[in-house]
Image (tube, grey):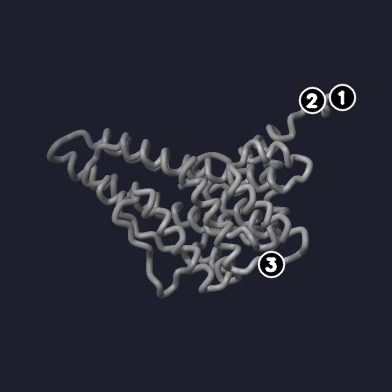
Amino acid sequence: MIHDRIDPVAALRAEATRLAGRPGDLVQRAGVYHHLFHHSGCNHAFPLLAAHGALWASGYFRSAIRLGTWLARAEGLVRGGADDRIATLHRLAEAFREINRQVCVETSFIYHLTGRKALARQAGQLVQPALLDAMDRCHHARRAGRTLDDRDRKRLFQAFFLWEQAQIVGPAVERAFAAFGWRIVKAAALRPRIGFAYFGSSGPLRFRDFSDTEERIDKGLAAFDRGASAGWAEVVRSLGDYGIVPAGIFADPARDVRSITRGAGAVTMMA
């Protein structure tokens, strides 16, 4: 039979790729991330914080491109080359959208791969031991209907975060900034102020050098700690504060993801 020849691991990756959408589909990915958090029994915090990252980035990219375009045209009056600067700015933004897409693919793929007992051998071959152990603990708690405490949630978050920084984000960020030569805008891009909706009065996380992996890890763990302090129900609720998330994402996360898979009702936000 045809079904006998289907590679289940390849099928999982293909599905994860479809769900992640195009680079600009940031809101769609937020829905996928929220579903993963919900499906995990609210134990896997990385997808939830990644949902905030996608929604925050949507607004950040729009604002940065508007400001950069204005600056390029202003500089162009003196030096020329405005169109080239604007083009390089769009390439940088697209590179970061692609990073966001790749992280979503791997987050979904690893979650479902490690969650299927029938694929335990393949998971052992493809997922590094520390991350595999953390994901196994997550799935065990999910199946038992048990909620992890914040200490165990943080262990899982840290294991996944360290993996994705080493395997996806770190190398891709380095390449993106190496290819971007507009010094004044590059200096600003390296020092973002990231303000997720649930941060409240704590204020944004201010970067000195976004290309520094250790600083990204430090800020990522700080974002987790703020989520634990605010309460995970508030972190979920505040996804709506960006003003761009359809209500269906909250009302029925599984149905929302199914609609993306079918290609009907997929939410696209081109930032």
Q: Position of residue 86 (x, y in %)?
A: 30, 39
| Residue at x 57% of width, y 67% of height | 151
Instruction: Locate residue 20 relative to residue 142 in the image: left or right.
Output: left
| Residue at x 23% of width, y 37% of height | 82
Rendered view: 164 above or below 198: above
Q: What residue type is disc 1 on?
A: Met
> How far is disc 3 from disc 1 in space, using C-alphas?
41 Å
Which residue has dot 1 on it? 1
List the single residue furthest toward the left: 78
Of labels 3 and 2, earlier in sequence is: 2
Which residue has dot 3 on it? 147
Q: Observer-nearest residue: 243 or 52? A: 52
Of labels 3 and 1, earlier in sequence is: 1
Tell me the number on the disc at residue 5: 2
Q: Position of residue 229 (x, y in %)?
A: 51, 73
> How far is disc 1 from disc 2 in space, using C-alphas?
7 Å
| Residue at x 51% of width, y 58% of height | 52
Q: Nearer the viewer, mark 3 or mark 2?
A: 3
Residue 181 lies in quadrant: top left
**Circle 1 SS class:** loop
Q: Position of residue 148 (x, y in %)?
A: 65, 66
Q: What residue type is disc 2 on?
A: Arg
Rendered view: 56 above or below 76: below
